[in-house]
Image (spheres, rainbow, N blue to C red):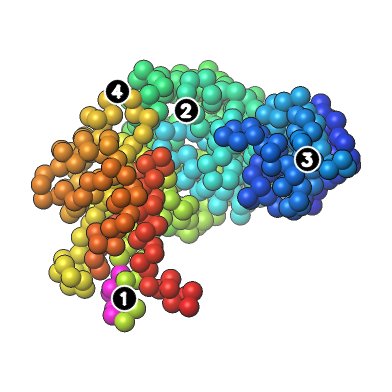
Amino acid sequence: MTLWTATDAAAATAGHNTADWAASGVSIDTRTLRPGDLFVALSAARDGHDFVADALARGAAAAMVSHVPEGTPADAPLLVVADVQAGLEALGRAGRARTPARVLAVTGSVGKTSTKEMLRAVLSHQGRTHASVQSYNNHWGVPLTLARMPADTEFAVIEIGMNAPGEIAPLSRMARPHIALITTVAAAHLEAFDDLAGIAREKASIFQGLEPGGTALYHADVDTAPILRAAATTHATRTISFGRARGAHHRLLSADLHATSTVARARAWRTPLLYKIGTPGRHFAMNGLAVLACVQALGLDRAVAIADLAAWAPPEGRGTRERLVLDLAADGMSIDLIDDAFNANPASMAAALDILAAARPLDDVGRVARGRRIAILGDMLELGPTEAALHAALAQLPAMQAVDEVHCVGPRMRALWDALPDAKRGHKAATAEALATRAHRLVDAGDVVLVKGSKGSRVSLVAEALRRADRHQEKDQG
């Protein structure tokens, strides 16, 4: 299927073509490029122009460039634009303009990607749905998502993130959502903001991009809810709140964690709701409630959405749970790994520890008679001058009482290690690489192991090291 013709792309970007072409996709990375993609030569850590020849050799339909790269064949199909980033943004705006899709934009300090994926799963069974890949939510991720959107899309889910003030509103105006959702406001990216109120104002700027008649959804439980509500009433025709607060339009009444699911009860105005999420986590129950509020705002079938939520599981690195077999010859010789190593701040760390606390280890199957709950925690980044206190405060979380052992990775997590009682202190390591080398010695059959930290802490290396001990994987490969 043709996504962009040379003529349409040139009209969108005010560029000119060196040859005729037609593209079935859009890519910014030669490692994931598919034959038929338009390769966009962005300049980030490396200048994308250096990879144009490789992209074309891999089957790219054409390349968007600001100049003809050295070594490019004379007959190479190129879309030449004044600036590649601006060209991508123009292509994204054109992609958005040509579709009748109802667009949802999602932001928040915690839960953006998980909520986006819930919406993808729910909406896909009620219409042709397009959504952001992974966490493509920044100045290039949003226009790339829009540029990739097929013209016949019925629902689009666009994740919008930020690292500094002033980033969300322009991206929201580009996406032009009919519904904008703020999952929550929490201590994240505090290096760039004076306080939580500043973060709330930035998150609330997503409402500035709403289409006329648009709907704003926000979390009613956070202390900064008045800021969110004020922005919502200013920019939206309809405002919907969700949370545990008594005045919330969609109110979560309870969320019970089970081994592989969460069962929640709620009210949508006067309508009682009972729904299940196919993975444990009270924060997933709250995100699911926000999704059901979106479904209602779209006028879709809520019963179908509830059924889809029951089968939903988080994306890799966002709280996925898997069983790793340590010994194929003996029953029960396994551990349960909760991989949540993609992102971390105090709120998401608390949610992950809640899941660990609710998990049930197996006793009498390993060297240690009692199965344990083990947390392997990496640094939480971009928290600003109070980062040491925020790390240490994790020791006081109620869920920490149920954790048997905590291993700390990185210089910031030293504050948590110092705050823990001796009985809970595991290893502390300056780097994830150092702890990964001993990962297999940290666990025993029957344990439930949480790996959690900011992506920059590289604590995902410990999760990968634990997976290498999975004998079941070895059997499959053999």
Q: Which dot, 1 or 2, sits closer to the camera?
A: 1
Crowd around label 4: few <14 · some 14–19 · many ≥20 (10 Å): few
Q: Which residue is mark 4?
A: 385
Q: Which residue is mark 3?
A: 71
Q: Amino acid at mark 1?
A: Asp
- Residue 171 inside the magenta-drawn segment: no
Q: Judge whether residue 226 can be spotted in this image.
A: no
Q: Amino acid at mark 3?
A: Gly
Magenta residues? 330-334
Locate residue 176 relative to residue 434 in the image: left or right. right
- Tell me how many marks there are: 4
Which of pointers 1 and 2 lies earlier in the amino acid sequence?
2
Which of pointers 1 and 4 lies earlier in the amino acid sequence?
1
The residues tagged by marks 1 and 4 sit, at their Cα atoms, a distance apart of 46 Å
Q: SS at mark 3?
A: loop
Residue with the most extreme bottom position = 329
The residue positioned 52% from the left and 48% from the top of the image is 117
Q: Amino acid at mark 2?
A: Asn
Q: Which residue is mark 2?
A: 163
Q: Position of residue 175 (x, y in %)?
A: 64, 31
Which of pointers 4 and 2 lies earlier in the amino acid sequence?
2
The residues tagged by marks 4 and 2 sit, at their Cα atoms, a distance apart of 16 Å
Tag 1 near tag 2, CB within 8 Å: no
Instruction: Pick the residue in front: 4 or 410.
Output: 410
Locate residue 15 relative to residue 379 in the image: left or right. right
